[in-house]
């Protein structure tokens, strides 16, 4: 398969120019980073769609990638976009059984901001 046909991972960039998900991953241990990147490769290979327990639908087009490492339950909200892009919107460490609404709101806000400013990603 040529590279033009493969899915690509892109980080959402906020209005300050920060890639919050990339920053989140960079703060993790090397072992946790390796697990994250292997899950992102699986996500690309599966064209942005994985079933539970790896991924779960959240709201609208937004899904969460679940990366559990020991007792740490990391979550990345993402969605699949045109031209085979997987946009990583928001990441956090899940500490409760239910996904906190404020984390979902952050992902929705980033999603809406991405759609408004998508031309800067091309």
Image (cartoon, grey):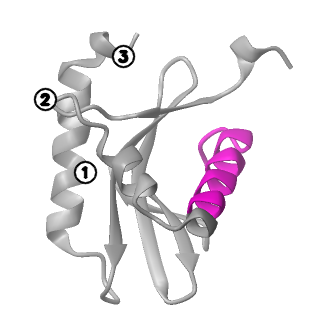
Q: Nearer the viewer, residue 38 or 60?
A: 38
Q: Residue at x 17, y 31 (%)?
A: 113
Percent x, y for residue 57? 44, 60
Mark 2 neighbour class, 10 Å CA radius: few under 14, some 14 to 19, many 20 or more: few
Q: Secondary structure at mark 1?
A: helix
Q: Residue at x 57, y 59 (%)?
A: 33
Percent x, y for residue 111? 26, 38
Rendered image: mark on residue 121: 3
Looking at the image, tell me whether mark 3 or mark 1 is earlier in sequence order.
Answer: 1
Kindly indicate whether the residue at mark 3 contacts the one at mark 2 (C-beta within 8 angstroms): no
Rendered image: mark on residue 15: 2
Q: CA distance from mark 2 to mark 3?
A: 13 Å
Q: Is residue 10 visible?
A: yes
Q: CA distance from mark 1 to mark 2?
A: 14 Å
**Mark nearer the viewer, 1 or 2:** 2
Total count of labels = 3
* Placement of the C terminus among the 4 image quadrants: top left
Q: Secondary structure at mark 2?
A: loop
Q: Secondary structure at mark 3?
A: helix
Q: Is residue 118 above or below residue 47?
A: above
Q: Residue at x 42, y 66 (%)?
A: 75
Percent x, y for residue 32? 57, 67
Looking at the image, tell me whether mark 2 or mark 3 is earlier in sequence order.
Answer: 2
Q: CA distance from mark 3 to mark 1?
A: 17 Å
Main SS, magenta region, reads helix
Mark 3 neighbour class, 10 Å CA radius: few under 14, some 14 to 19, many 20 or more: few
Kindly indicate whether the residue at mark 2 contacts the one at mark 1 (C-beta within 8 angstroms): no
Provide the residue designation for mark 1.
107
């Amino acid at each position: 398969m040529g590279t033009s046909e493969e899915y690509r991972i892109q980080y959402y960039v906020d209005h300050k120019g920060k890639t919050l998900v990339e920053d989140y991953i960079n703060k993790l241990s090397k072992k946790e980073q390796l697990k994250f990147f292997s899950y992102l490769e699986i996500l690309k290979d599966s064209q942005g769609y994985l079933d539970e327990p790896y991924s779960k639908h959240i709201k609208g087009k937004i899904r969460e990638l679940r990366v559990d490492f020991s007792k740490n339950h990391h979550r990345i909200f993402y969605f699949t976009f045109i031209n085979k892009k997987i946009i990583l919107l928001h990441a956090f460490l899940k500490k409760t059984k239910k996904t906190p609404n404020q984390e979902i709101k952050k992902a929705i806000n980033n999603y809406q901001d991405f759609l408004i400013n998508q031309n800067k990603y091309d």
